[in-house]
Image (cartoon, grey):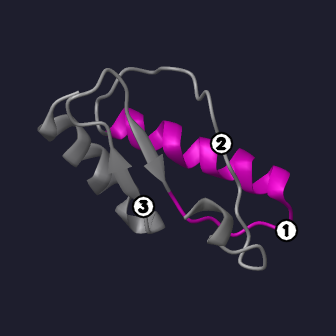
Amino acid sequence: MDREEILRLADAIAPHQGIASGIGTTNYAAQIVVEAPTSGEAVVRAKRIFQAAATQAGLPAWPTVWTLPISEETGFEDFA
């Protein structure tokens, strides 16, 4: 993925407090913030947002292979 492709993805996910990655690799990824009543619903919502953002950025429609919901209660300490 080149810089411009990932920048387009970053622009598309920015409204969701998102960050995009993948410059110089063969894939792309993002971290986004969603609000949902359960982890499962958060994953569903995040996948929809991510897929729409990838389409908006003109990226290939590859399947989502990994999602990780993190709640405010859980925090990020385990992922530092």
Q: Secondary structure at mark 2?
A: loop
Vertical position of residue 79 compared to residue 61: above or below: below
Q: Secondary structure at mark 3?
A: loop
Q: Cα distance, mark 2 to mark 1?
A: 17 Å
Compare marks 1 and 3 and give the one earlier in the sequence: 3
Q: Nearer the viewer, mark 2 or mark 3?
A: 2
Q: Which residue is mark 3?
A: 18
Residue 68 badge: none
Question: Dot 2, crowdedness within 10 Å: few (<14), some or many (≥20)?
Answer: few
Q: Which residue is mark 1?
A: 37
In depth, the one of 77 and 3 nearer the eye is 77
Q: Cα distance, mark 2 to mark 3?
A: 14 Å
Q: Quadrant of the N terminus?
A: top left
Q: Does residue 68 appear left or right of residue 28 in this picture?
A: right
Q: Which residue is mark 2?
A: 67
> What residue is at 28 percent from the left and 26 percent from the top?
25
Q: Nearer the viewer, mark 2 or mark 1?
A: 2
Q: Cα distance, mark 1 to mark 3?
A: 20 Å
Residue 79, horizontal then vertical, whole percent: 61, 60
